[in-house]
């Protein structure tokens, strides 16, 4: 019994720490975002609605079941009745049902990645070797109104084969074997978004070829002793990526492209200063 309680306490502390990291790194603001951990059986540790995740303590965390009515919702620390989890709990539950191999979920609104989601653009995981091994491509799920059944339905077709998704006009959701790993995946999505946009500003990203992707995946497979790896297919060869994918670069020179971007940025900055 003591070991179970120690594990539960550690999971509570992990959730509090990840909430603070998300807030400190401005991957969420105000009361945004939500986290969850599968405790075993039909029980889950979840963050509450309407609470800043950067200032949570153990009394804020909730233990609930798949059917999160007031009768089975308790404070993680005291066991007394508590507030309700986020209205996006159905999104988490859908992912757990589709991915029984995963034990934690992290949902946040990192600004760079959310900008891609708001622009209707997926992220090509074949841009960086590290992303090939950890995430693969990050697809864009259709828009679903938060707090409704539209949101879990939107991820249903993607989450079985991808650990990280962009949510159209909404944010990012990641799943992993632990909450810390799910957080790291979310960080990786945000870094990929940053690099992708900066590469475009510099004249256009140069995606790895199919041969280069295969070489990276082969090395990772040999090291791990497994043939399981994230889905990462160069966009020009992929059959699963449609209108929401990263568009090809326009047929203009890099120099002209950079001049246009610099001019637009300068005008925007001057406009703000005025």
Image (spheres, helix red, strand yellow):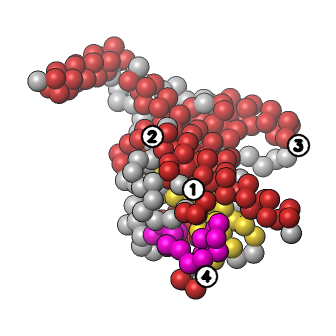
Tell me the CA gap for discs 2 and 4: 33 Å
As for residue 32 lying within the magenta part, the answer is no
Tell me the CA gap for discs 3 and 1: 40 Å
What is the secondary structure assignment of the residue under circle 2? loop
What is the secondary structure assignment of the residue under circle 4? helix
* Residue 38: quadrant of the picture: bottom right
Q: Which residue is pictured at 85% across the width and 36% down the height?
A: 223
Please state the extent of the stretch shown in magenta in the rendering: 74-91
Q: Assess whether mark 3 and mark 2 are in contact (beta carbons under 8 angstroms).
A: no
Q: Position of residue 78 (x, y in %)?
A: 64, 70
Residue that mark 2 sits on: 26
Tell me the CA gap for discs 1 and 2: 19 Å
Comparing labels 2 and 3, the label whose residue is closer to the camera: 2
Residue that mark 4 sits on: 72
Look at the image and tell me in which quarter the C terminus lies: top left
Comparing labels 4 and 3, the label whose residue is closer to the camera: 4
Tell which residue pokes out farthest to the top in this image: 255
Comparing labels 1 and 4, the label whose residue is closer to the camera: 1
* Mark 4 crowdedness (10 Å alpha carbons): few <14, some 14-19, many ≥20: some
* Residue 257: quadrant of the picture: top left
Q: Of marks 1 and 4, which one's residue comes earlier in the chain?
A: 1
Q: Of marks 2 and 3, which one's residue comes earlier in the chain?
A: 2
What is the secondary structure assignment of the residue under circle 1? loop
Comparing labels 3 and 1, the label whose residue is closer to the camera: 1
Q: Which residue is pictured at 54% across the width and 45% down the height?
A: 20
Q: Is residue 80 left or right of residue 225?
A: left
Q: Which residue is pictured at 45% across the width and 47% down the height?
A: 28
Look at the image and tell me in which quarter the N terminus lies: bottom right
Tell me the CA gap for discs 4 and 3: 42 Å
Q: Which mark is residue 57?
A: 1
């Amino acid at each position: 019994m003591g070991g179970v309680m120690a594990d539960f306490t550690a999971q509570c502390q992990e959730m509090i720490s990840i909430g603070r990291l998300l807030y400190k790194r401005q991957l969420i603001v105000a009361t945004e975002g939500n986290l969850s951990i599968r405790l075993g059986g039909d029980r889950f540790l979840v963050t509450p609605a309407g609470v800043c995740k950067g200032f949570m303590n153990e009394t804020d965390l909730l233990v609930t079941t798949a059917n999160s009515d007031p009768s089975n919702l308790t404070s993680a620390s005291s066991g007394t009745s508590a507030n309700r989890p986020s209205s996006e709990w159905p999104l988490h539950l859908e992912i757990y049902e589709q991915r029984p191999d995963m034990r934690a979920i992290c949902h946040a609104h990192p600004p760079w990645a959310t900008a891609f989601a708001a622009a209707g653009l997926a992220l090509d995981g074949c841009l960086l070797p590290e992303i090939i091994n950890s995430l693969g491509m990050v697809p864009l799920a259709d828009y679903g109104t938060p707090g409704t059944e539209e949101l879990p339905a939107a991820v249903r077709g993607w989450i079985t084969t991808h650990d990280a998704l962009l949510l159209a006009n909404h944010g990012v959701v990641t799943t992993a074997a632990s909450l810390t790993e799910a957080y790291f995946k979310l960080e990786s999505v945000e870094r990929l978004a940053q690099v992708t946009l900066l590469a475009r500003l510099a004249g256009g990203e140069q995606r790895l070829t199919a041969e280069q992707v295969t070489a990276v995946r082969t090395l990772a497979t040999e090291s791990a002793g497994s043939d399981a790896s994230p889905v990462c297919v160069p966009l020009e060869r992929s059959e699963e990526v449609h209108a929401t994918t990263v568009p090809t670069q326009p047929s203009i020179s890099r120099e002209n492209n950079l001049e246009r971007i610099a001019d637009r940025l300068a005008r925007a900055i001057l406009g703000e200063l005025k």
